[in-house]
Amino acid sequence: MNIAVLMGGVGFDTQKRMINGILDSALPEGTNVYIFTCDGWYYASRFKYENGEYNIYNLPDFTKYDGVIINLETIHDVKIRETLVDKIRKAGVPCASMVVKIDGSINIWMENESGIHAIVEHLVEEHRARRIFYISGPVESQDAEERLDAYKEALEQYGLKWDDKMVAYGDYTYKSGVHAVNEMLRKDMPLPEAVMAANDDMAVGAILALNEAGYRVPEDILVTGYDNSSLAQLNHPRLTTVRRGEYAAAEIAYRALMEAIRGENPQREHIVYGKPIFSQSCGCDKKQSYTHAELQEMYVKKTVEVNDNLELLKCCAAEFTGLETFDDFKECAQQYIRLLSPDYFYLCMCGSIENYFEELERMAEGKERGRDETTYTEDIWVPLAYENGVFNSYDGFSRNELLPSSCRMGKQGNFYLVMPLHHQEYCFGYCVVGNYRAALEGRFFRHFILSLDNALETVRRQDTMNAMLGRLSKMWLYDELTGVNNRAGYNKFAPRILEEAQRKQLPIAVIFADMDGLKKVNDLYGHEEGDAYIKAMANILEHNRRHGELLARYGGDEFVIVLNGYDEDGIREYIERIRKAIGQYNARYTRAYKLDASVGYFLETDAKKASLELLVELADKNMYRIKREKKAAQRE
């Protein structure tokens, strides 16, 4: 049994509880869980980086799964949400939707009203608060809107007034809580008696801002949060908050989905109610949740864990920055994947290595890449796989399969995180990591994947630069018309042949070929035909090279061949081979003119006495002698 889970930001408390609720129910039953997730879940203006992150939701083929669990509240791109819902419906697989209702699906609603009402009731009844300010989540969030509406309704039930000045908006981060309180304190209105926040992070930010402004919590101002996160439990003072029930909701979602998969008729609508937890930040529950010794132990363990993770990230970032080739990247990545030690890790790349270098060549030539770089190709390959301690690789397969059928991944009761690999909007591919709980704890693993992203981009830029330099080098050293070496190429490579001959005590020779009748062809048939005449001669000379000798276009209609290790008979045989090839060309192609060239050479048996300039000069003289003899014979 395989199910897909789609949820953003799985390292955060609320999503983590949902994932754990699913995994704790699914894995003991042998169900495989594929979690498609990314870091692009913030309520912020969209950037290219977030576009690259959200691309992961274009990857799954839902027909490959028995069912789907989705939390659209954590996927904040409206078009992506609509596309996902449409694809799930078309796939015809059972779906359980958490938080956001999807018509035709099993819907698990974690209601917000009762928790907010309970907090307001407590602040008013127990603490006599009347001026209660509110920090809402972003307007795009369904949860945030429901909690804000519940706050307004609760105040109205107690006959308390509220206005827009009493409400600030954040993005669920503690920084937005700090900003919201600072804005409230600057307003020309009475100080609040209590501040309610739509989540715990913003509540902690509010406490920090109040403390910075000289106000004590709860002595001067009461503060409450929502979600009962680990931050709420460890904060001093411990937050009054609402336990939302994500774990229980996830268990319900899985059980109902399994019923639907088995063809049963599950309940289609479920409601999970929030439960308030009254604690120190509103002046209740004076006791600490943890003893001093427990807090010390937790602090030490967390500090050691964070320092270890930071050291690993620092080292891999430093090493990845200096990579030059893809092979370097694979070798370096292997070291760190082995240190992380997941059960499975698959680096899934778009296309193939051949496609990659073809793309580099196109870029070097100033052409289009040849593919949509913002999404996944149909073909995927795995250059780096880690399976229970053994490294491997796999050739191409369809992206719809997610992983190659021949891979050694577990068959039952495993979970896999599927995360994007990209730089900004440029899509490298995706990675699949199996049975690695550390990926669900905090943000460490996400930062490691970001290091992989940056390393891949470093290598890509290095390869792009090398391709462009290669292109420039080719343009400098090679004749654009014929593709053989030009005069600059001759000047660079000819001395190497001479040096080899001198070192190995070999004969050195230069063959000089001057085309016959090029001016006549240009005058009668045009320069385009003349160019074809030159290219034909270059092709014949190129195809008759045997042992790495240098061929260069020395002038407009002149070619030289520099070669060593040949004696007189070998040189004459070489030239005869060229003449036969010219004859075969003329026999094959019927034109108003014949391809021809005058060919001379000069051989020096003692390379230590030779100079390239003299060899070319003497070969040129012999060529002109042959050309004069040929013209004289034609006149007769």
Image (cartoon, rainbow, N blue to C red):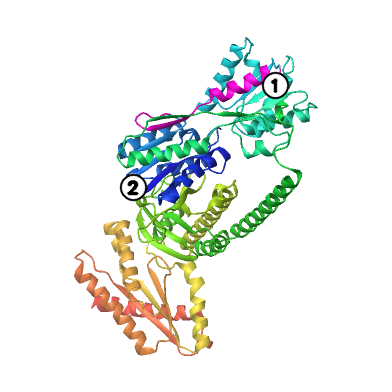
Residue 117 belongs to magenta span: yes
Question: Mark 1: which amino acid?
Answer: Ala
| Residue 551 point in image, percent of width and height | 41, 73
Task: Say if 223 sits above or below 34 in the image.
Answer: above
- Residue matched to label 1: 194
| Residue 318 point in image, percent of width and height | 64, 58
Front-lying residue, 322 or 70? 70
**Which numbered marker is on residue 64?**
2
| Residue 126 point in image, percent of width and height | 69, 19
| Residue 576 point in image, percent of width and height | 29, 82
Front-lying residue, 109 or 581? 109
Residue 144 belongs to magenta span: no
- Residue at the spot 62% in from the left edge and 12% down from the top edge: 158
Q: CA distance from mark 2 to mark 1?
A: 51 Å
Choose mark 2 or mark 1, whichever is in front.
1
* Number of residues whose C-alpha sits closer than 10 Å to that of mark 1, classed few (under 14), some (14–19) or many (20 or more): many
Residue 324 position by quadrant: bottom right
**Which numbered marker is on residue 608?**
none
Please tell me which of labels 2 and 1 falls first in the chain. Answer: 2
**Farthest-out residue, top:** 159
Task: Say if 116 sits above or below 589 in the image.
Answer: above
